Amino acid sequence: MATKIRLQRFGRKGYAFYQVVVADSRAPRDGKFIERIGSYNPNTNPATIDLKFDRALYWLQTGAQPTDTARMLLSREGVCLKKHLLEGVKKGAFDEATAESRFNAWIEQKKASLTKVKDNEREKKKATAKSLLEAEKEVNKAKAAELSKKRADIAAEAAAKAKEEADAKAAAEAAAAAELAALKESTKEAQAETATEEAPVAEEAAPAAAEEVTEEAPAAAEEAVTEVVTEEAPATVEEVPAVAEEAPAATEEAPAEETAPEAIEETPTAEEAPAAEETPKAEEAPTAEETPATEEEKPAAE
């Protein structure tokens, strides 16, 4: 039976990985197999190969034919080189120690090359990440500049708006102050006009008030005089009888010529009552009427 070392596909669309198997050449690709000797994942860099070295060497020595991809994988892992060195030992070209030393040297070289590839890949990744970071920094810087510009524009607009509002407020306050001043001026003018209008009225009212005062003053004086006369009149009435009584006595004691002057001198006492000369209504007092009567009675007594 012809056997082959080939790959079986696994995974999903766009992400395939393979199993290295030994199968009958007549079996389908993903069909029945004899033994699984490893795996291959091409999605990593470098590709990941996991191979059972002894079992792969055994199947090569027994005549299994690898496919092209399987041969590349076996050659990369050193299975083909190991088979070639063992055949040289069988033929006597060199001994087994020499073959082992050559194989070890090739393994070290292979590891160094793989390490170099891995390092290069790592540096490449770092460079790519650094370039992406620099690009991102530039983008962020541009965004920050744009954002700062927008903020500055917004701040400028806000400042302009605040300034406009302040100017409008100041203008409104100035207008209000001017309106208030105009209102005060108008009120002052109105007050001045009312004062000028009330002044002639006050001047016209002043004479009338003076006339009323002058009219009321005599009446008050007359009332005062009447009160004074009414208070002092009884006293004069009481004094007059006393004078009348004294008059006969005088007629008895003295001659008629002497009594007449005394009676005349005493009669002014009756006239002294309630300031008849000072008040305009002194004539109305009863003493003024009674005193002449006493003067008339005196001659009769004589």
Image (cartoon, rainbow, N blue to C red):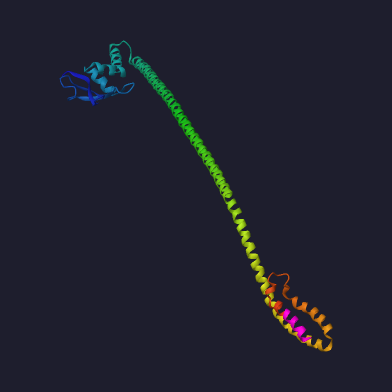
Foreground residue among 51 and 189: 189
Residue at x 26%, y 16% (from the top left corner): 71
Query: Residue 254 at x, y = what percent?
Result: 84, 86
Q: Does the segment drawn in magenta span residue 163?
A: no
Foreground residue among 2 and 167: 167
In which image quadrant can residue 106 be found?
Answer: top left
In which image quadrant can residue 31 be found?
Answer: top left
Q: Which residues are magenta?
A: 291-302
Location of the C terminus (image quadrant) = bottom right
Residue at the far bottom: name it. 252
Residue at x 51%, y 35% (from the top left corner): 167
Query: Residue 192 at x, y = what percent?
Result: 58, 47
For residue 264, side relative to residue 60 (left or right) = right
Query: Residue 120 at x, y = what percent?
Result: 39, 19
Query: Residue 169 at x, y = what percent?
Result: 50, 38
For residue 249, side relative to residue 137 (left or right) = right
Q: Is residue 232 visible?
A: no
In which image quadrant can residue 122 be found?
Answer: top left
Q: Is residue 68 visible?
A: yes
Q: Is residue 276 above or below residue 151?
A: below
Q: Is residue 181 above or below residue 142?
A: below
Residue at x 63%, y 62% (from the top left corner): 213
For residue 100, side relative to residue 263 (left or right) = left
Mostly what secondary structure, the magenta segment?
A: helix
